[in-house]
Every structure is written in C-alpha cells, then in structure tokens.
Amino acid sequence: MPNSFKRPNFKAFSTLALGAFGLAFQVPMAQAMPISELVVTYAPEGANAPSAQAQDDNAVWDLRDIYPSVAAWAAAREAVASDIAALVELEGQLGENAQALLRGLDAIFAVYKEVTRIYVYTSLNADEDIGNADANARRLEALATYSDLQEATSWVDPELLSVGSARLEAFLAEQPELAQYRVYIDNVLRGAPHTLSPLGEQILAAAGKVTGAPSEIYTILANADMPWPTITLSTGEELRLSQAGYGRGRQLPDRNDRQLVFDQFWGIWKAYESTFGAILGGHLKALQLETRERGYDSSVARAFFGDAMPPAVYETLIHEVNLGLPTLHRYFRLRKRMLGLDGEMGYYDIYPPLVQLDKTFSYDTSIDLTRQALAPLGEEYLDAYNRGVQGGWVHVYPAEGKRSGAYMNGSVYDVHPYVLLNHNDDFDSASTFAHEYGHAVHSVLANAAQPWPTAGYSTFIAETASIMNEMLLQDMVIAQAQSPEERLFYLGSALEGLRGTYFRQAMFAEFEFRVNALADQDEALTGARMTDIYLDLLKRYHGHDDGVVTIDDLYGIEWAYIPHFYYDFYVFQYATSIAAASSLAEQIGSGDADARARFIALLKAGGSDHPYELMKQAGVDLANADAHRALIRRANAIMDDMEAILAGLED
C-alpha cells in the first residue's frame, strides 16, 4: 500500500492508513497530510509466515536515525506540545505583510515537520511487533499530538482566505522565499467554497480524534482479535488460517486443500459480516461528515478535490477496465489450461503459481538483481538506489508479531526513507523489494530536489514509480531466463501483477464508489448489503455468468478483509499508476529519448504541482484511454509469449 501523502492544508480530516496495510496505523488526516511520502504496499493477500531467519544488523532498520532513544522521542513530543500551543498566537498576523506571512508559515510547517517525525518513529517501532502494548500506546500518543496540531492550526485556512488572493499574490511577488508555499496557498484559495469558519474548522479538526476510530477498530479486529481456525491439509500438515496462513494456503498445490482454505477462511469472516459492516459503515459516516459540512456534491468530489483530480480519470479507468475484461478472462482461461483443471475453474484457483521455480532469491540477490534491472533509468537514479541499500533503511525478514506486507515510509524529510519487507527469499520477495525501492528512490529524489512543503507526492504518482521498477525487473528476468519453464514462471508472475494491481484494484474502486454513493444518499449500509454489492462485482470481473471463473456466494464477504476501503478512494490510484507505468515503460522501451528524462523529472517534482498535471508533463494523460490500452497490450503480449512457449513444449 501508500500511499504518499501531501503537505498540510490544515483543514478537515479523513482516515488513511499510514503503515503496512493490514495495515494500519491510521491517522486522522487533513486533505494535505503532513505525513507525506508514506507509500504503502499492502499484501495481506500475500502475507508471509514468520521466518526463522536471524535479523542481523543489516536486516533491521535503525530508528536511532530519527531519535536516539524512546526517551529522546518523549522529550521531542513534550517540546512540540509547547510549539503547538504557540502557533495559536500567530492568529491574526498572517495578513500583516509578506514577512509576517513567511514567518507564520515557516513556524507552522516546521511544527508539522516535527510532529511527522514524532509519528513516524512510533509507527515504525509499533510495526516491529504489533502486539507491543507500549509501542502502540506511543503511536496513539503521537496521533493525539497530530490531532492537537490540526486543532491548533484550524484557523489558518480561513485567515488566508480573509487576506484575499490579491494581497497574497502581492506577498508572493514581494518575498521570493514564499515560493515554497505557492502550491499550499493556491490550494487554500481553490478550496474557499469548502472552507468553514474558524470555529467550524476547529470543530472538524477536534473531531479527528473520534472519526479515526473505525479504522483503528478494524485493524485490531482483523489483525489481532479474529479467532483463526487451524485446519488439517491432505498431507496431514496443520495450517493456522490467520491472514498469513491464508496467504500461504491459497497457493497450495492440492486443489481440495485450496478450497478448504477458502471455505474455512471466508467462513470466519462471514461470521463477522454484521460487525465489519458496522465498522466500515462508521468509517463512511465519518467521511460523510466532511462531505456535507464542507458542501461537496458527493464523496467522489470530496476525495478528488485535494489532488485537483478530474473525475474523467476515474471514469476512464472504470470504462477501460470493463472494456478490458475479455483480456482478464483470457488470462483466467490460460491459467485453467496451465493448471490442468478439469471442469469449472474456482475462485480458489486464482493464486497458485502457474509454474514452480526451484530457485532462491536471497535478500542480497534481490538487491543485485534490482540494481541490474534499473540500469535503463540512468546513473542519477542508481546513485539514489545504492545509497538506500547500504543498511539501516530496511526491516527485512518476517518475525513473530511483525506487521505483514510491505511498505515504504519516506516522511522523515531530514533522515531517509524506511522500508518494511517480509522477505521470504523467493521471486515475489525480490519483486516486492524492487517495488518498495521504487518508492524509496522517489522519496530520495523528491526530498533532494524540493523543500519540505512540496516534497510530498501523491499516491497517484507514487505507485507509478514503484511499478516501473517491478516492470523493469520482470522484463530483465524474462530476457535472462535459462529455460522455457523459468521464462513461463516470470511471465506468469508479470501477468498476475497486472491482474492484481489493475483489474482487482479497479474492482475495489467500483465497490468503494458504490458504497460511498449509497452513504451520500443516506442508504442503510449493512454488512449483508455490502456483501451483495461486492459479490456482484466479483462475479462480473471474473466472468462467473460466462463460465470463466465460478464464484461461490460465500466469497462475497471478501470486502471485509480489504483494508484499502478505509483509505478514502485510495485503491483506484493503484490501477491508474500501473496504467501510467505501462505507458511510460512502453515509451522508454520504444526508444523515446526524452521519456527517461521526463520520468526522472516526475520523481523530482514531488508535490510541486497537482499530480494529474505532473503526470501529463511526464507524457501520460490518465483521462485518456491510451495509457490503459498500453497495459492491455502488455498483458496480451505476455499471453502471446506464454502460449507460444506452451505450444513449443507440447510439440
């Protein structure tokens, strides 16, 4: 998952996870969150079991780069409380003159920067062991500090609006150092119709301490408190069906075992359907508070406003994904053929690898392979990459109690990005490493090129950087494969990535759109109703009615398992990002001499403009069908290659 988050505009809140999705550390978040470059790639779906591998010094991140000790963190939190209180005294001064505006914004942004540091330290520390009560308490204390800061700065946007655009423009022209706040000021002015009175802003900011509760409850229930059963497989082995166990069990070679895993796992979630319905319903009600109080026409309008995202981007995605479903169904039929399935293909046949690869990818191998794959991006990119793999940045291996999945957090501007992995020495681990280091290099380049107020970048761009790394790695290992079977393995992995990141995330986006639309209309959103909505989408995307993949009604409860739905229209950006990466990779691969330079410029740009405009400058317009069709071309080319190999093996 992440997410990369923007800088503060001191208004409102929504709830976003700031950690490995399963994920969650949830943070009440202003439309422009100070916790900026957190990019999260979650995979409870591919969650790994704890590893016996020792965590040597090079395999564990060094949080002392943020604070030398917990005591130092506590002292910083105590000190920043005074700084927060002092910000209230700035009220009424921002419009006096250009120097007063600069002093005020410098002070405000400096406190946000420190509170970000305070929060990130606790979130990373808590993810080392999600059962550590002390670490989780510190994280909640950091969240409370952030909420206090939001409340203390709730007057800022209304005051800037009262100063007026003409006077603010004059200040910007007079004082060059205000240029770093240009994007922020423009966004405040653009948001005038949705900005409340100082009192209204204060009330909404204070409400952030409450409205984040549903996602916190979800996280605890889904990750810690669910009563996971233990099943006996056909081999006699016992498997505990936690999220990690499900991630392993759904890939088992025996089809009956896979069906048992699905039926038992989703049966547990089904038993909590009403509870999860109430939790997600509570989250949607919290979003509705902001939608209505700020006068947005819909939840979509609210969610897209901060990025100035044209609705056509979402509309084009859904239109093109649905046009592309025959390509997805072609993949499912190919998968059925390669798995040698008789009769119907079930939902539990989606995940087992098409080809087994008896090959180990150690952490060092992941580093070296990724370095080779990134060569087409040039020396500047590789220099940033090499700085990040020398130690202290990464928590590498699975461990008991450690957060599942993987993510990058680049929000501590003056330090360096941090990466959480659950490296299991397989190709998926190598691919995940490449993905997360796409985020890490993005943060390194953006932080070096931009001041803190504009270094944070949108998720809309963030995932493009990481997926580009994955695609370069895929293309390299496919070209270097030593046998048809190995080549098939990598091709199948690439194809599965397109399914999971494009089609599946778009399906999630349709679900999110539907439930938010119902919330907009004050419709009752029970768990059962959410299951009906999700099941309808699940069947359409998988060709159930056409006999492509058979979807058991029980599996409609899968919505309850997806943490992305607590991150406010986050998921559609995965799908747009992989479309953008496909288009950019196609441009670079075609010999477009400027494509690489445009891509690097995109990464360096951080949040210096709205993400849609930055992406267009890089050569991709996601309100246009071309990028999406580049992805469909890539998927069909992969399947053409796979079918040719299969034909050769069958001769």
Image (spheres, rainbow, N blue to C red):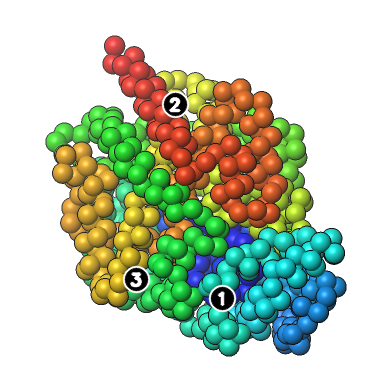
Residue 285 is left or right of residue 175, and the answer is: left
Image height check: is 344 above or below 49?
Answer: above
Residue under the point 65% across and 75% down: 161
Disc 1 marks a residue whose amino acid type is: Thr
Please state which of residues 593 and 467 is positioned toward the viewer in this rendering: 593
Report the Cα–Cα distance between label 3 and label 1: 20 Å
Point out the residue furthest to the top here.
651
Foreground disc of the pair 2, 3: 3
Report the Cα–Cα distance between label 2 and label 3: 50 Å
Q: Position of residue 555 (x, y in %)?
A: 23, 56
Query: For mark 3, what is the residue?
Result: 520
Residue 476 is left or right of residue 101, and the answer is: left
Query: For mark 1, what is the residue?
Result: 195
Residue under the point 38% across and 55% down: 509
Q: Earlier in the sequence, mark 1 or mark 2?
A: 1
Q: Secondary structure at mark 3?
A: helix
Find out whether the residues at labels 3 and 1 contact each other: C-beta distance under 8 Å. no
